[in-house]
Amino acid sequence: MKLRSLSSRIALMLAMAVTLILGGSALLIDHLIDAELASRFDDTMLSQARAIAALVEVNARQPDLEDLQRMPSRLLLGDTDAAYRVQCAGGYHIDRVPATLHYPAQWLEQAGERPRYANLESSGRELRAVWFRFHPGQDNDHADADQPACTLLLLQPASELDEILFTLDAILLIIPLLALVAVIGLTPALVRRGLRPLADLGERMRGIGPAAPEQRLPAGEVRELAPLVERFNEVLERMQEGMQRERRFAGALAHETRTRLAELRALVDVEIRHPSDRPRTEVLAEIGVIGGELEDTVTGLLLLTRLEAGIESIQWQAFDLDAAIDKQLAAVAELTGRRRIAIERVPPARPLQLVGDVSVFGIVLGNLLRNAAAYAPRGSRIHLAWDEAGLRLDNDAPELAAADVAQFGSRYWRKSARDTGGAHAGLGLSLAAASATALGLELRFELGAEKRLAAILAWPKERVVESD
């Protein structure tokens, strides 16, 4: 199940982390305590066994089996259920072992100076056994190999140790379990309290929107929320800039539309009230020019919308690149001639074909050429070159700054008004950028140190074919 609440997710993760940490810690502590108690139990057993061996050594020269039979029980083992057996070379032995008790397998053969331990089960009881070999009457560190040796076996019930371990296990289970329940119960409330600054931030965001784009979130005291506040304020900055550009675009579009309609209406009214001596064809031609400019503006806006939405169909085919460029140069010839702009063409050594849509490519290049011809200083020069890697169009742009170049391609931005011959209220570069994207081409702009603007249209080499 996917949790939708952030506090529930954090609480669940904390509960899982606490469960794993407490559970793992309890298991580790239990293992260490069990090992330590088992080691101490073995040490106690060994001490008792060595004490029994010491009594045997004291009485080794005058053995009194009956006395030795009683002394360890009375002095060392008390009333416990411990059992022992001392098997000495020479045939005699001392034991306190019930007949039903089983000895460890091959305990005599495996006996050595170093104590050995084993766990046994007899009559449904768990026993711990320790046995070792010693030499009565001699120092074990300097024992003679020919000296008769004895082997001592001590058996102790493990029930007392098991009871202690069970008690400790219960303690280690109950206390962490209670702590875990307390943590799980308190975690949701603590998480909600910790996330309260996030809820407060959401409340402050509630009053910010298009109706009040100038508002900003104040810097908070919570360090983790500072990046969120900063990014949100950046979004508000971009939103405000976008709305301002949209208002400028709407104003420019409304102005151009109103101007064209006003010109059209004024022309018709004048001709109706005060007929001129001009031929009707000339008047209709002027009306057609005004209507054409208005149509160009609306058509450009609709085409930009279709390109940005991805619903403009692309007809992929190879077309003659030189012919497409010459066609667009002819389309801006009137504008360049009026502003005395010279265009210098630098074609490749061999004619090229480009795989794409020639009409959409015409939109890209046509808008770039019209933009350069309209904004370049009068009497200047435009340089146009292309090859297998792409096309480069550069012109003088003394009024531009680096910040202006960053705005290129925005549908709501225009540096200044120019006689563009119907440049669609600043839509030219937006149309060029959207068309280039639809064709899979890369369009970028660079402003050189000498205030010369370059429009670079790059295409993949696999899209270029040499003409025969």
Image (cartoon, grey):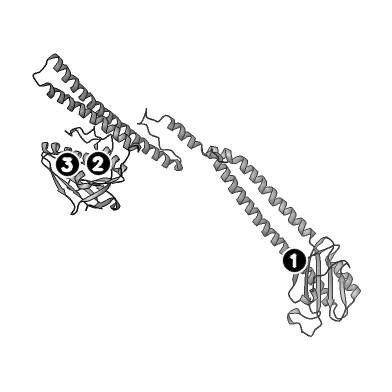
Mark 1 Cα-neighbour bin, 10 Å: few <14, some 14–19, many ≥20: some
Quadrant location of the N terminus in the rendered image:
top right
Q: Which element type, helix, strand or loop, lies under badge 2?
A: helix
Looking at the image, residue 419 lies above or below residue 145: above
- Direction from residue 107 to residue 296 in the image, left or right: left
Dot 3 or dot 2: first in sequence order is 3
* Residue under the point 82% across and 70% down: 103
Does the image show residue 452? no
Mark 1 or mark 2: which is in front?
Answer: 2
Residue picked out by circle 3: 329
What's the distance in space between the residues labelled 1 and 2, CA to CA? 92 Å
Numbered circle sitting on residue 364: 2
Which residue is at the far left? 277
Mark 3 or mark 1: which is in front?
Answer: 3
* Residue under the point 49% across and 35% down: 199
Looking at the image, residue 329 lies above or below residue 460: above
Dot 1 or dot 2: first in sequence order is 1
Q: Which element type, helix, strand or loop, lies under badge 3?
A: helix
Q: Position of residue 115 (x, y in %)?
A: 74, 72
